[in-house]
Amino acid sequence: MRTVVFEAPPAQAVHAWMPSSPCGPGCIEPIGEIGTARVVARALGVAGLLLTYPMCHLATPAGRRDNLQREYARLLLRCLGMRLRVVDKRIPTDPVPAERAIASRVGAERAASAAATADVRYADRGTGVLVVTGHIGWTDVVALAAVQPLGFVARADLIDWPLLGGLAKLMRVIPIERERLRQLPGIVAQLGERLAAGERVAVFPEGTTWCGRAYGTMRPALFQAAIDTGTFVQPVRLRYLDGHGDRCTVPGFVGEDSFGNSALRVLRSRGMIAEIVLEPPEYPGLDRKDLARRCELAVRGDEMSRHGMNDTRWIEATATRVEDPAPAEPTAPAVTHSGVDRRGLRSRAVAVFRGRGRAPEHAPRTEAASDSARA
């Protein structure tokens, strides 16, 4: 009799609104692997961390639990064979040291190492922020928490997974059943309450996982919580790289993949990097569709195709093709109340974001948002 551990079947689309991804096993490209002994050692390390964290969490004073959770997440990444690299694009850096670092290979390596260990945070403690990013696999949650602890909106059955379910409860995951549309307003309301209370919450607006070389469109529904509470949105560009710095699809949890197969694939792989890039924060504005488009542009940038996906040749040719959404029209630059373009120096925006206040109740609207409202 075969014992199945961590078996988590993919969600099946039961209505037209429910997001669907054409990514499958053909998208996963293996990289260098380690030996069996090291795989076992990694697995034991992961199991030890998952088993001890609940006890350590309860034994730690509330004021120190954020640091505990972040350190555990970073240790968990190491046990999975991943290095963490964090890049903060919210505050401009002095170009002179950067040029010197680029000119020197040793300097560039040191700069990358410093970026990976920098004390970067999504927001100051007590400042609510909605973190949005693309969804590749179950390791996304660990990578995001390794920067700064935060809650998540995640698939409802995660609560029932062995070991991970207990962690999900401690992290105060907001469960969502994507096949039940009637629950969506309640999820948005619950998310809004968390943000208004000064909590950090991450969402995956694509609604499903993609392989990392292709992407879906960010659905606007959950962005309404940021608009209702006047909370800044933090776009995060999350990707996985191999030892050569190329895109890596090993962590992709797609198609008919099970958690057991996915976990074993990750544990076997050598030299992976989880890269998290924090883009400048976005004002919530008044239009959730416009906010979703702005965040998608920030997260994807020039990687986006007109169909909201990148590098579609990596998608299995035999996969069922989902109907692409209508291509989004280019929007006007997102102007802050300081009159600076989204891609420029947004000093006042960052100042407000970093605990000095909430977004203005009536933040300036982009031209695209105004046109949408008139329509």
Image (cartoon, rainbow, N blue to C red):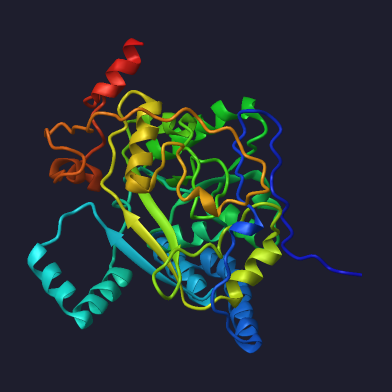
Q: Residue at x 43, y 29 (%)?
A: 224
Is residue 292 shown to the viewer in this render?
Answer: yes
Toward the viewer: 355 or 73?
Answer: 73
Is residue 299 shown to the viewer in this render?
Answer: no
Residue sitting farthest toward the top: 374
Q: Report whether 70 appears left or right of 33.
A: left
Q: Position of residue 232 (x, y in %)?
A: 31, 39
Decide: is 194 above or below 47. Answer: above
Q: To which quarter of the image does residue 80 belong?
A: bottom right
Q: Position of residue 119 (x, y in %)?
A: 29, 66
In this figure, what is the number of numbered marks? Answer: 0
Toward the viewer: 16 or 358?
Answer: 16
Locate the C terminus and report the quarter of the image it occupies: top left
Toward the viewer: 13 or 41?
Answer: 13
Q: Report whether 191 appears left or right of 92.
A: right
Q: Where is residue 138 in the image (x, y as percent from the top left)?
A: 57, 58
Q: Which residue is drawn at 55% across and 63% down?
A: 251
Q: Report whether 42 appears left or right of 304.
A: right
Locate the N terminus and report the quarter of the image it occupies: bottom right
Toward the viewer: 357 or 214?
Answer: 214
Residue sitting farthest toward the left: 96
Q: Report whether 255 appears left or right of 148.
A: right
Q: Position of residue 302 (x, y in %)?
A: 33, 47
Decide: is 243 above or below 343. Answer: below
Decide: is 111 above or below 330. Answer: below
